[in-house]
Image: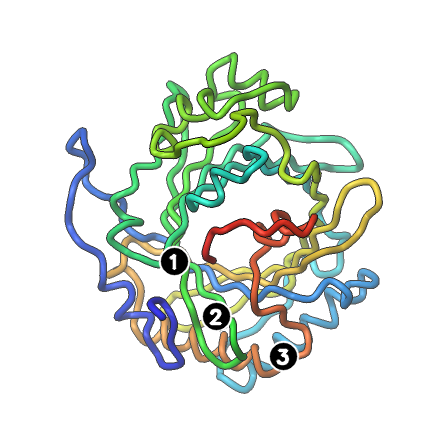
């Protein structure tokens, strides 16, 4: 299947990009992030000790592969708490067309802090399709585009790598037009048409049912997030790795965990090939070290969409 491998393919994957422009003449966005993710079984997360337990597995894999490892100072602190909400139609029209709309709020001492973050994503395995998707929102305020290559294990077994290309835009809720801001802040009545006005790529989504947009599966996600270590892949390629648990607000039912680390660089030519190969070796070794923890067939977003047993059609 396209986007899957058991060999060292990161440099070749990054080289797939092509030149082109969007409708207004702006050059295609370049990949600037490499994010590696392991999706974890939720039943492992029984207490805060789990974060330190998994950190020991990460340290072991780093030692085997020669990757630099340092405990993160925050490993001794309480996990951060964030609230995550996904918006879609009742029939998941957005997700079934590879789009994701998410709102996230950080909490400190039980109170929301800072500007709620709105994220709009398009995900695919195809580089040409991902680059050509112009994710810029129809707002006058500030926004940030993040074009990422995401690496996950193969779905069939551990020891390999598959990829997702994630072309994202994010902005503070205060940057959106007032009507959209009020609807997203209160989770009031919204329609697909209103989201299409805010995010032009959604205009390609045809709705064959009710256009009302609401919380996916009526789930408010409570995210516990903990930085656990710094990883050094050499050649100035360093990353903070974190561990997160997603559970439903109210009953606190845990349904998915994730270990992730991310490299930032200036375009596909802005990172050393040997650093990429070290990153991939470590990622595959950690799959072996933490094999009993892994959930191979989903992502965090996919887990939210499957909470009520009605799986969407999007391929992840």
Who is closer to the viewer here, 268 or 120? Answer: 120
Q: CA distance from mark 3 to mark 1?
A: 23 Å
Q: Position of residue 166 (x, y in %)?
A: 40, 50
Decide which of tag 3 and tag 1 comes sooner along the chain: 1
Q: Is residue 85 left or right of residue 277?
A: right
Which residue occupies the extreme bottom position in the image?
64
10 Å neighbourhood of mark 1: few (<14), some, or many (≥20)? many
Tell me: residue 7, above or below residue 183: below
Tag nearer the camera, 1 or 2: 1
CA separation in Å, label 3 and label 2: 22 Å
Residue at (18% x, 29% y) in the render: 24
Neighbour class for label 2 at 10 Å: few (<14), some, many (≥20)?
many
Residue position for label 3: 291
SS at circle 1: strand
Label 2: state its secondary structure.
Answer: strand
The residue labelled by disc 2 is 232
Image quarter of residue 240: bottom right
Instruction: Please report the residue visible at 71 percent of the width from the left and 31 percent of the height from the top.
Output: 112
Name the quarter where the N terminus is drawn: bottom left
124 up-or-down from 39: above or below:
above
- The residue that label 1 is drawn on is 149
Image height of 83 relative to 306, above or below? above
Q: Residues within 10 Å of mark 3 (few under 14, many from 20)?
A: some
What residue lies at 56% left-to-right and 58% top-to-bottom? 299
Query: Can you say whether 292 is above or below 46 in the image?
Result: below
| Rendered image quadrant of residue 202 | top left
Q: Position of residue 72 (x, y in %)?
A: 64, 62
Which of the two labelled residues, at mark 1 and mark 2, occupies the earlier sequence position?
1
Q: Secondary structure at mark 3?
A: helix
Q: Earlier in the sequence, mark 3 or mark 2?
A: 2
Disc number at residue 8?
none
Q: Position of residue 147 (x, y in %)?
A: 36, 48
């Amino acid at each position: 299947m396209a986007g899957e491998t058991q060999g060292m393919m990161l440099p070749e994957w990054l080289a797939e990009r092509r030149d082109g422009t969007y409708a207004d003449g702006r050059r295609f966005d370049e990949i600037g992030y490499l994010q590696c993710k392991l999706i974890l079984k939720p039943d492992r997360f029984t207490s805060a000790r789990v974060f330190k337990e998994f950190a020991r597995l990460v340290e072991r894999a780093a030692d085997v592969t020669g990757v630099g490892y340092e405990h993160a100072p925050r490993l001794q602190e309480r996990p951060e708490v964030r609230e995550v909400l996904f918006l879609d139609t009742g029939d998941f029209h957005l997700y079934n067309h590879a789009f994701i709309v998410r709102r996230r709020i950080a909490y400190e001492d039980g109170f929301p802090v800072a500007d709620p973050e709105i994220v709009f994503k398009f995900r695919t395995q195809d580089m040409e399709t991902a680059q050509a998707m112009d994710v810029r929102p129809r707002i006058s305020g500030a926004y940030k585009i993040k074009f990422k290559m995401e690496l996950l294990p193969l779905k069939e077994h551990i020891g390999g790598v598959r990829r997702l290309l994630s072309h994202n835009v994010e902005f503070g809720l205060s940057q959106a037009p007032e009507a959209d801001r009020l609807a997203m802040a209160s989770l009031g009545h919204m329609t697909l048409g209103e989201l299409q006005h805010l995010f032009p790529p959604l205009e390609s989504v045809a709705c064959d049912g009710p256009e009302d947009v609401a919380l996916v599966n009526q789930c408010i996600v409570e995210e516990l997030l903990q930085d656990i270590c710094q990883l050094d892949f050499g050649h100035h390629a360093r990353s903070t790795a974190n561990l997160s648990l997603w559970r439903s607000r109210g009953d606190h039912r845990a349904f998915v965990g994730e270990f992730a680390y991310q490299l930032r660089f200036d375009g596909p030519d802005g990172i050393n090939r040997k650093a990429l190969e070290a990153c991939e070796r470590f990622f595959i070794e950690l799959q072996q070290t933490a094999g009993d923890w892994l959930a191979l067939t989903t992502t965090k977003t996919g887990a939210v969409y499957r909470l009520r047993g009605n799986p969407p059609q999007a391929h992840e």
